[in-house]
Image (cartoon, rainbow, N blue to C red):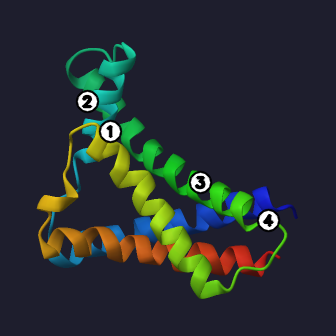
């Protein structure tokens, strides 16, 4: 299996882990889902001049496209890792950290650039809600990437 395919598979597995940990956190703490994915869709549609429709139709499109952005981030981080790793074996802990950072940057940087969030203003709870699922992403993605070598 080539490194790009391994990266995509690792990204998919990592995204599943991230989603699981996020939903578990929501269930345990009784917190609502983040609205930033839908806000990102809305802002990107505005910038691109794309009409999402009106009312419920627009809300449904944002609800569908928001998670797709997350899948794209997770798959993209895995793909970038596969490209960067090249033919050499990356130690699993190094891979886990690299994949965690790639996924966090891939999700937070665009939302920051769009003016939807500012990590400098996050509370400790906000950071935990972001870092912990991304650590799960990185650990699982690195393990899968390594196992598929």
Q: What element carries label 1?
A: helix
Q: Where is residue 58 in the image (x, y as percent from the top left)?
A: 28, 23
Along the viewing direction, whichever of 149 and 19 lies nearer the viewer? 149
How would you rate the neighbour count of disc 1 (Cα within 10 Å): few for under 14, some for 14-19, many for 20 or more?
some
Whether pointer 3 and pointer 1 mark residues with C-beta atoms closer than 8 Å, the reply is no
Along the viewing direction, whichever of 26 and 141 lies nearer the viewer? 141
Circle nearer the N terminus (4, 1): 1
Question: Looking at the rendered structure, which numbered label has been put on residue 59?
Answer: 2
Circle nearer the N terminus (3, 2): 2
Q: Is residue 44 left or right of residue 136?
A: left
Q: Is mark 2 on a helix, strand or loop?
A: helix
> Whole-Å distance between the Cαs marked 2 and 1?
6 Å
Q: Name the residue under label 4.
A: 86
Labels 4, 3: front one: 4
Q: Residue at x 26, y 30 (%)?
A: 59
Q: In this view, does 19 lie to the left or right of 78?
A: left
> Whole-Å distance between the Cαs marked 4 and 1?
36 Å
Q: Residue at x 53, y 57 (%)?
A: 74
Q: Mark 1 points at which residue?
A: 63
> Whole-Å distance between the Cαs marked 4 and 3?
17 Å
Q: Position of residue 127 (x, y in %)?
A: 23, 71
Whether pointer 2 and pointer 1 mark residues with C-beta atoms closer than 8 Å, the reply is yes
Labels 3, 2: front one: 3
> Whole-Å distance between the Cαs marked 3 and 1?
19 Å
Q: Is residue 113 left or right of residue 77?
A: left
Q: Where is residue 123 in the image (x, y as percent from the top left)?
A: 11, 69
Q: Is residue 127 left or right of residue 95?
A: left
């Amino acid at each position: 299996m080539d490194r790009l395919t391994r990266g995509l598979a690792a990204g998919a597995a990592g995204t599943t882990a991230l989603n699981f940990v996020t939903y578990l956190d929501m269930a345990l703490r009784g917190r609502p889902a983040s609205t930033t994915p839908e806000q990102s869709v809305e802002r990107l549609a505005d910038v691109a001049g794309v009409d999402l429709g009106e009312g419920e139709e627009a809300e449904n499109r944002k609800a569908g496209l928001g998670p797709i952005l997350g899948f794209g981030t997770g798959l993209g981080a895995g793909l970038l890792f596969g490209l960067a790793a090249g033919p050499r074996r990356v130690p699993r802990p190094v891979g886990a950290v690299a994949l965690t950072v790639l996924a966090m940057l891939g999700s937070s940087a665009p939302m920051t650039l769009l003016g939807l969030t500012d990590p400098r203003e996050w509370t400790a709870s906000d950071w935990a809600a972001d870092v912990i699922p991304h650590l799960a992403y990185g650990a699982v993605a690195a393990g899968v990437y390594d196992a598929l070598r």
